[in-house]
Amino acid sequence: MSKDVIIACDFNSKADLMTFLDKFENEDRKPFLKVGMELFYAEGPAIVKEIKARGHKIFLDLKLHDIPNTVKKAMAVLSALDVDICNLHAAGTAAMMEAALEGLTRADGTRPLLIAVTQLTSTSEERMQKDLLIDRPLDEVVMHYAKNAKDAGLDGVVCSPLEAGKVKAVCGDAFLTVTPGVRFADGEVGDQVRVTTPAKARELGSDYIVVGRPITQAADPVQAYHRCIREFLGGEVE
């Protein structure tokens, strides 16, 4: 399994995104990019196609959550964009996840990877219990959602790096863990609650780490990306 760093491109316009990507113009390694709601809603599907044409892998982070039939149809549309990873909320139930997988699978049997969000890394156990009325411990909820996702046929989950090893123990080493909530040891945490460093995320079992502001808002984004690669993959950028 190939591990990688995914840069969260949380920009609100094509112009800001391209200014950022131009900094990597001379890099042999094209960064894996996450396109989230902010950019996708601002620019539409065309921005995904343009990024793909520049040679980047794409994690399309739209976190679908609706009735199974609606999610199935939406996933069929997203599948045509030729992204590498899509996601949805595990809280939408196994039926929704199964429908999503069916919609995402193309006529020739190919499809992007499909992963499920367990609990957002901005969610603390206190908030989950108070706001969502989920009284079970946070770890137990995350593991239950991960097991549901695996049973529905999904490829992995989005979870905190602090939970990655436990997810592997419950769902197997081949089940992907995509982990946001990663910050450099000397950086700010921001609005994340369950966070760790790139090196610690590797140690805990993350397959992919998603890093946004520590790279996109760095004085030298390319240098920050290289640092992230070194700390997470244990080597230089290839």
Image (tube, grey):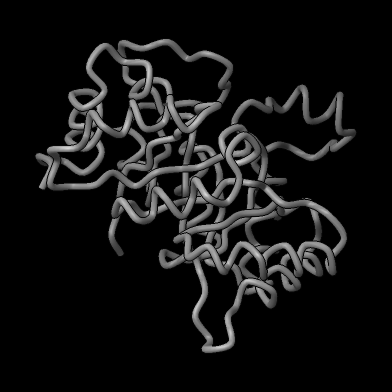
Furthest-bottom residue in this view: 108
In which quadrant of the rendered view does residue 20 lie?
Answer: top left
User: Looking at the picture, how far across and down is residue 222, in whole percent?
Assistant: 21, 27
Which residue is found at the position 12% from the left and 47% from the top?
28
**Residue at the spot 61% in from the left edge and 45% down from the top edge:** 44
Count the marks: how many?
0
Rendered view: 21 above or below 146: above
Up-down relation of residue 8 to residue 148 (above or below): above
Relative image position of residue 58 (x, y in whole percent) = 43, 52
Q: Please identify the quarter of the rendering in which residue 219 is found.
A: top left
Q: For this rendering, which residue is in front, 112 or 202?
A: 112
Position of residue 225 in the picture relative to residue 238 (left or right): right
Residue 104 appears at what percent x and percent y?
62, 71
Residue closer to the observer: 48 or 90: 48
Q: Give the position of the N terminus as an image quadrant.
A: bottom left
Q: In the image, is 104 to the left or to the right of 134?
A: left
Residue positioned 72% across, 52% down in the render: 64
Q: Position of residue 59 (x, y in %)?
A: 47, 51
Q: Nearer the viewer, residue 20 or 120?
A: 20
In the rendered image, the vertical position of residue 102 relative to residue 107, given as above or below? above
Q: Residue at x 56, y 35 (%)?
A: 39
